[in-house]
Image (tube, grey):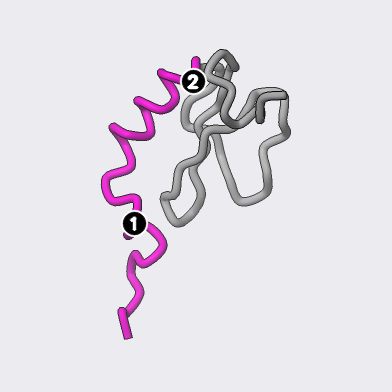
Amino acid sequence: MTNPFDDTHGTFHVLVNEDAQYSLWPVFAGIPAGWRPVLEDATHDDALAFVEANWAEPGMAGTRGKSPC
């Protein structure tokens, strides 16, 4: 069985949290607390392209406004 989060034939929302982290989320799953949709009912490829175009610094999002020390 395919993991629904990896299903390239599935339909997805793109979610974002307060740290500007993005997630592809299957449409059948409820949106978790702390996340909001920024793209709805997209193909896997379209959702992934949206994330790649909008998540400028994936490794740095959680450190926004925080001291490195």
* Magenta stretch encompasses residue 7: no
At a point 44% along the width and 56% down the height, the residue shown is: 19
Residue 52 percent location from the top left of the image? 32, 34
Q: Amino acid at mark 1?
A: Gly
Instruction: Give SS at disc 1.
Output: loop
- Which is nearer the eye, 22 or 45? 45
- Residues at marks 1 and 2 touching, judged by CB atoms closer than 8 Å: no
Task: Spot the residue most to the front.
Answer: 1
- Left/right placement of residue 30 relative to residue 55 reads right
Residue 48 percent location from the top left of the image? 41, 28
- Left/right placement of residue 25 relative to residue 42 reads right
Residue that label 2 marks:
44
* Magenta stretch encompasses residue 66: yes
At label 2, counting other C-alpha atoms closer than 10 Å, the crowd grade (few under 14, some 14-19, many 20 or more) is many
- Left/right placement of residue 25 relative to residue 64 reads right
Q: Earlier in the sequence, mark 1 or mark 2?
A: 2
Residue that label 1 marks:
59
At a point 49% along the width and 43% down the height, the residue shown is: 16
- Which is nearer the eye, 15 or 24? 24
Residue 59 percent location from the top left of the image? 34, 56
The magenta segment is: 43-69
Residue 47 percent location from the top left of the image? 44, 24
